Structure formats: structure tokens, C-alpha cells
Image (spheres, helix red, strand yellow):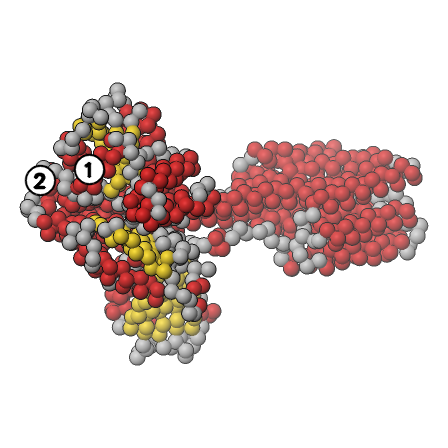
């Protein structure tokens, strides 16, 4: 595509936006548009951004689900950037309409690759994402095929699409199709959770938060 | 009187008091109606007008107090009841001049036998002892009047016996009810206060939790920026590092974060005990967690009690006694034992006012929710003081049930019941045409009572209940067939109603009401068939109906209160559970804060100082950043030699992701050790990227390690022992 993709950042830390902005501007085909501390702030103006890099936990207490919903309704694609969040937040984000989840501490080239993939509308799966899904207690009730479950498990073990394809004797495209469908199924499972408190409770429900030890 | 003005009357007790006052008013109304009817029948209207007016005034006080009871405050209720009881006593006294002034009076007026209402009023105004006094005064006075003025006939005897029985029941059940409702109120207040305390603690912990996650955020913002190749102006990075460093320093000292500067935690307790033990020359043994999680007030109370126990031992154990202080701490509680091999004493012989042991040691700890305190000692065997606190569990907050009155009270009722019924039976035998019938009825009544008494459970079984109601109904039917329908000969109807009251108190309300309906129907039918005067039929039916109805009213009121208290308890239990969760999360976070301080602060301070970072520094940051992530996700894989291998790989610049997905059911320790060693070995080959993962339980491979795109699996070793049964 000839036109440049506009990339915005929603993050508590201006510094992150500053760094990511520099990285985006230095990449061909991408241009940094705007930084906001909240999703609400981002969508309060006319849409000037194509892809939003959204921090998973914001200080305003908003949940990933509501932030993603607001940004998608605004018309932007969303790539979630995480630092080291609890897996239930990752799972919660997986159940929303996002392109993927990338870790901020990824090696620079990998981060740029993830942003570029998202800018071109491709999905960005990661081992952390697959791991959070692969251990989801409701996986057993999710309408996934045996092959899709296998792909998810292999992805969670840290393989990329190419390696998974080689292991299963299918093409990389087929693996990506599987991943797309897994993502779609999970987004349908998205349960409403309005606040961080609810998310915390959900985390307990889902067995992510460890039970107090009976020492 | 000591309990003349109690500081506060709770909701349940107030409701019970109002029901009793209303009941007394109803009794008075019925007595007045019956008395007026009887006076009309007997042509007994010779009492002086001023006495009639006094009777009316006293009855008015009773009725007014009862009518206004639902809106009266506790004090007003007490004043009204006191006035009514005084009025009744006044009537008893001035009846002497009234009778003297009217020589034509042949019987003591019926109004004098409203002793149950007077007893109830005295109970409400001054307590149980006063109620018994009023009851005794009424018995003596009415008995004397009957002897002197007249009326010592079967009707009078039966009436007085039943009235005395009703008053006894009022005394026992009423006093018991007030005590029970008071206990319910106290339980409700305790539950409410524990809910409030827990909620406060919850708020503090939630604040701390949020603060901790913000710190995490600040630190990670710095580290990720250092690690990544992102272009950041050094000055801005230094500023962010300063902010993160400040946050780390703050959170490692939870007092600042929680905002309550005076919270002595578990660590303070252990340190404090060590100090006082050293001062008292005691040996100190500490086991378990050094910093147990204790709510506000607990650490302080335990420390004060321990200090006092040691002081006591130093003062009283005698020269040469050895002292040992043992502290066992766990996440959810703490146990302290102060023991000496000195003189010892008999704790039971301890005077009530010995403040040292009782107030300073035992009570101080016992008042804590979840606190326990005990002194074990005997002359010559040394002394042990046991102190403990356990996070309150659901069991500690058990809802109090409504207990039955004590054994003594029940025996008192039984004796009065049997005596009263025997006297009534005798009177009825003298009055009736067939003298053998009343003893037979007495026997039948005893059989029915025995059926109920034999039941082991508080609430009798449906079969027992049915048998009991059948026996009571049969007694009434047999009696009505064989006895003439008049007040004294039909005494057994009221006696049966007393038995139904017993059924009500054992919570079979429906069956008791059915029994009452059968009983009243039988009386009504007998009245119609024999063509008895309607007034007589009504007189026979009034007292039974009143007795059962009042009992039902009382029990329903108490049951409602009990349910409300149960609800409060459930809420308190739920809050306590949530607080336990928060405590667990808080403990984990404070541990993490300490780790942050140890691992991250030096790096942050260097960045904050604006020191240029070389490649090695960057990689060290990468390692620390990874460590923070691992705290969330590495779980059982956080063990040596894997930790060292991961650190080494990260310092080489490898992006390492460690995931424990075993879902709280990790492989046994031996397998984990093998897995960790295997992973550590292969990590050495990594150059760019590695993902180490403990698979969810039940997969063919326990663990996987993907190094630079190449996957390795660690399959489960064929089970050679019971090790394959873990997690079930």
C-alpha cells in the first residue's frame, strides 16, 4: 500500500509513547499520530489513527474489554502492548476484538515486526497469548477442533507458525487459518467485565490467582 | 436496681418486649370481659364505685401500654409496664377496704386473677426476680381473699390454678425470651462490627495492592525502555527511573502505603516478644513465619498479654523458676505459650478482681475476634499461659440458635403444671357428677405430655407431633363427652392448651394451631349439642385460644429476629473470606516489593543518576525485567539451577519466556528437579529466543522448551511408583 498507516498509543507512560513513536516514525509506511493516557481520551477526537497500541492495564481502572470496545467502535484496529501482566488480563484481552498481543520488552526488531504486521491488518499471535488460552478452564467447552487445540498447544510452547506447520505437515497458511479461527471462537466467548475489580474476581474464578496456602 | 436502666436494648429484645406488653394487654382485656360477664351472671355488683374506677384505670394502663407498644421506646415501655404492675399491686392492697365497705361482696373479683399480665408487666419493668415477687404476692393475696371473702369453690380454684400456671409460664418463658433476644442482639452487633473491621482491613489491603501494581508498572516502564532498542532521551529516562525508585522505596515500607502509621504487624510482635522474653530471662523459641499477617489490634493485644504473663511469672513463680516463651506463627494465625516451672497456683481459686491474670491477660486476648487465651496451672506444677489468634473462620461465626429454657425452668413449669392440674382435677371431681372422670383426664393429659417429653430433638418428628396432637384432642373429646360443659368441670380444655403451648415452643407452630382449632371446634360443638349458655362456652374457649395465640406470636417474632441475625452472620462470614483472600494477595505483594527493592533498586538508581548504560547494563536490565515477568508466570519453574540458567541466557541477550501452565497441580518435586535440570542444560544453547513451559496437567509432555524455533518436549517418565497419582 502506498499510503502511510497512522499509529497511536494509549499508555500511562508518556515515555513509552515517546519511544514507540520514534520507532514507528523510523519505520517505512508507518507514521506516529497521537499519544493518550486513556482510551476515552483517544476516541474523544475525530479518528486520526488506524492502529492503536493499547496498554493492557491503565491507571484509570478501565478494563481491556471496555477499552478495546471503545477503540473498535471508533474505527481503529487494536494491538495490545503488555509489560508483564497477569495471564488473566491477557486472556481477557484475547476475548476482545484485537489483532494481537505483543510484549513491550520484545527485542526491538520483533516489536517493529509486530507493529508492522498489525498495521497491515494481520494478526499477531504470541506464546503468552496461546498459553493463556491453552490453559483456559473453559477450553474444554469451547467449540475447537482437536487440530486447533493441537495448534494452540504448540504455539503456547513457543513455536512460530512456520515450526508448527512443519511439525503438523501443513502449510504456514493453514496454521494461520487455525489461529484466526481460534481467535474468533475466543472473541465470541468474551464475557462482559466492566471493571478491574471484576477482572480480579474473574481471575480467581478461572484459577489464575492462587488459592491462599493452608500452611 | 442494677438492671433498672440498661444502656441499650437491641432490636430483637425490643421486639420481644413489645410482644409481651401487647400480650399482657390482651390478657387484661379478656379478663375484664370475662369478669364483667361473670359479675353480671352472679349479680355481684356491690363493690364501691371508686374501686371499680380504680380497676378500670389499671386495666386502662395495661391496655394503653399494650396498644402503644409498637411505637414506644424501651424506656416508655418500661415506664408503662411499671405503672401497670404497680396498679395491679395497688388493687390487691385496696381490695381489703373495698371488701370491708361492701359486706354484700361474696366473691373475690375475677379481675384479681389477671396475675399473668401483672407478672409480664413486672418482668418488662424490673426483670425476672420482680416478676416472681408479683406472682407470689398475687397467689398469696388472692388465696387469702378467697378464704376470707369467699369464692373458694371449684370455679375459683380452677381459675386460680390456671392463672398461676399461666403466670409461671410467663415468668419462665418471658425471662428466657428476653435473655435469648439479648444474646441475639449481641451476636448481631458482633457480626456487624466484625464486618466493619474486615471491610476496613479490606480497604487498606486493596489500596496496598493497587499501589504495588502501580510500582510494578513504573519499574517495568523503565526496564522495558532500557531493554528495548527504543530511542528514548536519557534525561526523560532518568526522571522516570527516579519516580520508579521512589515508588519502590515507598512500597517496601507498607506503613507509608497503607496510610495508617500505627499498625503493628506480625514482625513487630515477634520482635517485641523477643525483647520482653530477654528482659524476663526466658528462653525464646520461634517457629513458622517471622512476619505473620495480623489485623489491627491483634499484635498489640498479644504482645501486651505476653508481657503481662511474663511479669506475673517473674513476680509469682518464685526464685529459680525457668521460663520458656514459644511463638508459633502461620499465615492465618499465631500461637504463644509462656511457661514456667515455678510455684503454680489454682486458677479457679483466683479472686474475680485479680486484674493481672483476668483482665490483662485473658480478657485482653479473648475480646479479639478469633482470640483464645487460657491459663493452665496448679500448685506445684508451674504455670502455662496459652495465647492465640486465628483468622476467624466460618465456624467461629456460627449463628446462635434459640435455645430451650434451662432444665430447672422446665422442671418448675412441669411441677406447677402437674400441681395446678391435680388441684383443678380435684376441684372438678368435687363439682362434677362423675368423680372418676377428672383423674382419668389427668392421666390422659400426662400421657400426651410424656409423648412430647420423650422426643430427643428440639423440633419433634412429624409422627411424634401427630401422635401428640391426637392425644391432646382425644383428651378434650373424652372430657367433653363425660363432663358437663361449665368453667370448672371443663378445666382440661385449658390444660390441653398449655400442652399445645409447649408444642409451639418446640417450633411446631402449624401443628399447634391445628390442635387449637380441633380443640375449639370440639368445645363449640359440645356447646351447641348440649345447649350450653354462649357465655360459658366463650369463657371455656377464651383462655386456651389466648395462650396458644400469644405463644405463636412470641415464637414468630423471635424466629424473625434469628433469621435477621443469621443474615448478618452470613455477610460477616463472606467479608471475612474476602479479607483472607486480600491478606494472601497482600502477603505475596509485600514479598514481591522486597524482591523489587533487592533486585531493581540498584539498577534504577544508576539510571536515575544519568549514568550511561553499556550493553552489559542493558542485559542486566533485561534479566531483571524478565525476573519480574517470571514472578507472575514462572510458578514452579522458579527453581535452581533453572533460575541461574535463565539469568545467564538473558544476560547473553536471549529473550526468555517462562510459563508455568500446570494449573496449580505441578509435577512432584523429583520430576520438577529433572525438568529444571533438563531445561537449564538446553537453555545454554539459546542464542535469540527461548520459551520454557510447564504444560497443563494431563498432556503427553510434562514440559516443553523451544529454543530459537526448535521445539523439545519432556515426556512423562513411565510411572514406577505412586508418583503418577499426583494432583488427584
Is there any visible trace of residue A18 in the rendered image? no
Q: Quadrant of residue B321?
A: bottom left
Q: Secondary structure at mark 2?
A: helix
Q: Residue at x 22, y 29 (%)?
A: A8
Q: Is residue B564 left or right of residue B443?
A: left
Q: Is residue A109 left or right of residue B720?
A: left
Q: Quadrant of residue A45?
A: top left
Tag on residue A112? 1
For this rendering, which residue is in front, B124 or B297?
B297
Marks 2, 1: nearer the viewer: 1
Residue hosting label 2: B234
In the image, residue B436 lies at what x, y percent? 90, 56
For this rendering, which residue is in front, B40 or B631?
B631
For this rendering, which residue is in front, B635 or A197?
B635
Q: Residue at x 63, y 54 (%)?
A: B404
In the image, residue B406 lies at what x, y percent? 62, 57
Q: Name the chain letter of the residue that bears numbered label 2.
A: B
B83 vs B584: above or below: above
Separation of residues labelled 2 and 1 (CA atoms): 21 Å
Crowd band around label 2 with a 10 angstrom C-alpha radius: few (<14), some (14–19), many (20+) = some
In the image, residue A98 lies at what x, y percent? 32, 34
Q: Secondary structure at mark 1?
A: helix
**Do the residues at discs 2 and 1 belong to one chain?**
no
Amino acid at each position: 500500500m502506498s499510503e502511510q498507516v497512522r499509529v497511536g498509543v494509549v499508555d500511562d507512560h508518556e515515555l513509552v509513547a515517546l519511544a514507540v513513536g520514534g520507532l514507528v516514525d523510523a519505520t517505512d509506511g508507518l507514521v506516529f499520530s497521537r499519544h493518550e493516557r486513556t482510551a476515552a481520551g483517544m476516541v474523544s477526537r475525530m479518528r486520526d489513527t488506524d492502529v492503536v497500541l493499547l496498554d493492557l492495564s491503565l491507571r484509570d481502572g478501565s478494563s481491556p474489554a471496555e477499552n478495546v470496545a471503545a477503540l473498535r467502535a471508533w474505527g481503529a484496529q487494536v494491538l495490545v502492548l503488555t509489560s508483564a501482566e497477569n495471564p488473566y488480563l491477557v486472556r481477557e484481552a484475547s476475548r476482545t476484538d484485537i489483532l494481537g498481543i505483543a510484549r513491550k520488552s520484545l527485542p526491538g526488531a520483533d516489536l517493529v515486526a509486530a507493529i508492522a504486521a498489525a498495521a497491515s491488518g494481520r494478526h499477531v499471535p504470541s506464546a503468552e497469548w496461546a498459553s493463556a488460552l491453552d490453559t483456559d478452564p473453559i477450553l474444554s467447552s469451547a467449540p475447537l477442533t482437536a487440530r486447533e487445540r493441537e495448534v494452540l498447544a504448540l504455539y503456547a510452547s513457543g513455536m512460530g507458525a512456520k515450526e508448527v506447520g512443519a511439525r503438523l505437515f501443513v502449510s504456514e497458511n493453514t496454521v494461520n487459518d487455525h489461529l484466526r479461527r481460534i481467535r474468533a471462537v475466543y472473541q465470541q466467548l468474551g464475557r462482559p467485565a466492566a471493571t478491574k475489580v471484576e477482572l480480579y474476581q474473574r481471575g480467581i474464578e478461572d484459577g489464575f490467582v492462587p488459592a491462599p496456602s493452608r500452611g | 436496681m442494677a438492671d433498672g436502666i440498661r444502656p441499650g436494648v437491641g432490636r430483637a429484645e425490643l421486639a420481644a418486649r413489645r410482644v409481651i406488653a401487647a400480650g399482657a394487654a390482651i390478657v387484661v382485656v379478656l379478663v375484664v370481659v370475662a369478669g364483667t360477664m361473670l359479675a353480671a351472671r352472679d349479680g355481684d355488683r356491690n363493690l364501691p364505685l371508686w374501686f371499680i374506677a380504680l380497676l378500670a384505670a389499671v386495666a386502662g394502663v395495661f391496655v394503653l401500654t399494650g396498644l402503644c407498644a409498637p411505637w414506644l421506646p424501651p424506656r416508655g415501655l418500661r415506664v408503662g409496664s411499671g405503672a401497670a404492675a404497680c396498679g395491679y399491686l395497688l388493687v390487691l392492697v385496696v381490695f381489703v377496704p373495698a371488701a370491708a365497705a361492701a359486706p354484700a361482696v361474696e366473691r373475690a373479683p375475677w379481675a384479681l386473677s389477671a396475675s399473668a399480665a401483672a407478672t409480664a408487666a413486672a418482668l418488662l419493668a424490673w426483670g425476672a426476680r420482680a416478676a416472681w415477687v408479683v406472682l407470689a404476692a398475687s397467689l398469696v393475696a388472692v388465696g387469702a381473699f378467697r378464704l376470707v371473702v369467699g369464692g373458694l369453690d371449684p370455679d375459683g380454684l380452677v381459675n386460680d390454678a390456671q392463672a398461676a400456671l399461666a403466670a409461671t409460664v410467663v415468668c419462665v418463658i418471658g425471662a428466657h425470651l428476653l435473655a435469648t433476644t439479648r444474646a441475639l442482639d449481641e451476636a448481631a452487633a458482633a457480626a456487624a462490627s466484625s464486618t466493619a473491621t474486615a471491610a476496613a482491613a479490606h480497604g487498606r489491603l486493596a489500596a496496598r495492592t493497587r499501589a504495588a501494581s502501580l510500582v510494578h508498572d513504573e519499574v517495568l516502564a523503565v526496564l522495558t525502555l532500557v531493554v528495548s532498542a527504543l530511542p528514548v532521551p536519557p534525561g526523560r529516562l532518568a526522571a522516570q527511573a527516579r519516580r520508579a525508585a521512589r515508588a519502590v522505596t515507598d512500597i517496601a515500607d507498607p506503613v507509608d502505603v497503607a496510610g495508617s502509621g500505627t499498625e503493628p504487624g506480625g514482625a513487630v510482635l515477634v520482635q517485641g516478644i523477643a525483647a520482653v522474653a530477654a528482659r524476663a530471662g526466658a528462653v525464646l523459641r520461634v517457629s513458622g513465619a517471622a512476619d505473620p499477617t495480623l489485623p489491627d489490634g491483634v499484635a498489640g493485644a498479644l504482645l501486651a498479654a505476653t508481657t503481662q504473663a511474663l511479669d506475673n511469672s517473674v513476680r509469682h513463680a518464685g526464685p529459680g523458676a525457668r521460663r520458656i516463651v514459644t511463638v508459633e506463627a502461620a499465615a492465618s494465625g499465631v500461637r504463644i505459650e509462656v511457661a514456667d516451672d515455678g510455684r503454680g497456683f489454682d486458677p479457679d481459686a483466683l479472686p474475680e478482681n485479680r486484674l493481672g491474670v483476668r483482665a490483662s491477660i485473658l480478657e485482653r486476648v479473648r475480646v479479639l475476634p478469633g482470640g483464645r487465651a487460657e491459663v493452665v496451672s496448679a500448685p506445684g506444677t508451674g504455670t502455662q499461659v496459652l495465647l492465640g489468634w486465628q483468622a476467624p473462620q466460618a465456624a467461629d461465626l456460627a449463628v446462635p440458635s434459640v435455645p430451650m429454657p434451662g432444665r430447672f425452668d422446665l422442671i418448675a413449669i412441669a411441677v406447677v403444671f402437674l400441681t395446678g392440674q391435680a388441684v383443678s382435677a380435684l376441684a372438678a371431681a368435687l363439682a362434677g357428677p362423675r368423680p372418676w372422670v377428672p383423674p382419668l383426664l389427668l392421666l390422659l393429659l400426662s400421657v400426651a405430655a410424656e409423648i412430647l417429653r420423650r422426643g430427643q430433638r428440639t423440633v419433634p418428628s412429624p409422627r411424634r407431633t401427630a401422635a401428640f396432637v391426637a392425644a391432646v384432642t382425644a383428651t378434650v373429646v373424652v372430657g367433653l363427652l363425660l363432663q358437663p360443659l361449665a368453667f370448672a368441670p371443663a378445666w382440661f380444655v385449658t390444660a390441653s392448651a398449655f400442652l399445645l403451648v409447649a408444642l409451639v415452643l418446640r417450633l411446631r407452630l402449624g401443628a399447634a394451631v391445628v390442635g387449637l382449632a380441633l380443640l375449639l371446634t370440639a368445645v363449640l360443638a359440645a356447646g351447641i349439642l348440649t345447649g350450653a349458655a354462649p357465655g360459658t362456652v366463650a369463657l371455656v374457649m377464651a383462655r386456651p385460644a389466648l395462650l396458644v395465640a400469644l405463644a405463636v406470636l412470641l415464637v414468630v417474632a423471635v424466629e424473625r429476629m434469628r433469621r435477621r441475625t443469621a443474615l448478618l452472620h452470613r455477610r460477616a462470614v463472606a467479608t471475612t473470606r474476602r479479607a483472607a483472600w486480600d491478606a494472601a494477595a497482600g502477603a505475596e505483594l509485600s514479598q514481591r516489593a522486597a524482591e523489587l527493592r533487592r533486585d531493581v533498586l540498584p539498577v534504577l538508581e544508576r539510571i536515575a543518576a544519568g549514568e550511561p548504560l553499556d550493553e552489559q547494563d542493558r542485559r542486566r536490565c533485561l534479566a531483571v525485567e524478565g525476573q519480574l515477568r517470571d514472578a507472575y508466570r514462572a510458578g514452579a519453574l522458579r527453581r535452581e539451577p533453572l533460575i541461574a540458567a535463565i539469568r545467564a541466557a538473558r544476560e547473553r541477550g536471549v529473550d526468555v519466556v517462562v510459563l508455568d501452565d500446570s494449573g496449580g497441580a505441578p509435577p512432584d518435586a523429583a520430576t520438577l528437579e529433572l525438568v529444571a535440570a533438563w531445561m537449564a542444560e538446553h537453555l545454554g544453547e539459546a542464542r535469540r529466543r527461548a520459551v520454557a513451559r510447564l504444560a497443563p496437567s494431563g498432556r503427553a509432555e510434562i514440559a516443553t522448551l523451544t529454543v530459537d524455533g526448535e521445539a523439545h518436549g519432556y515426556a512423562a517418565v513411565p510411572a514406577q511408583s505412586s508418583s503418577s497419582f499426583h494432583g488427584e
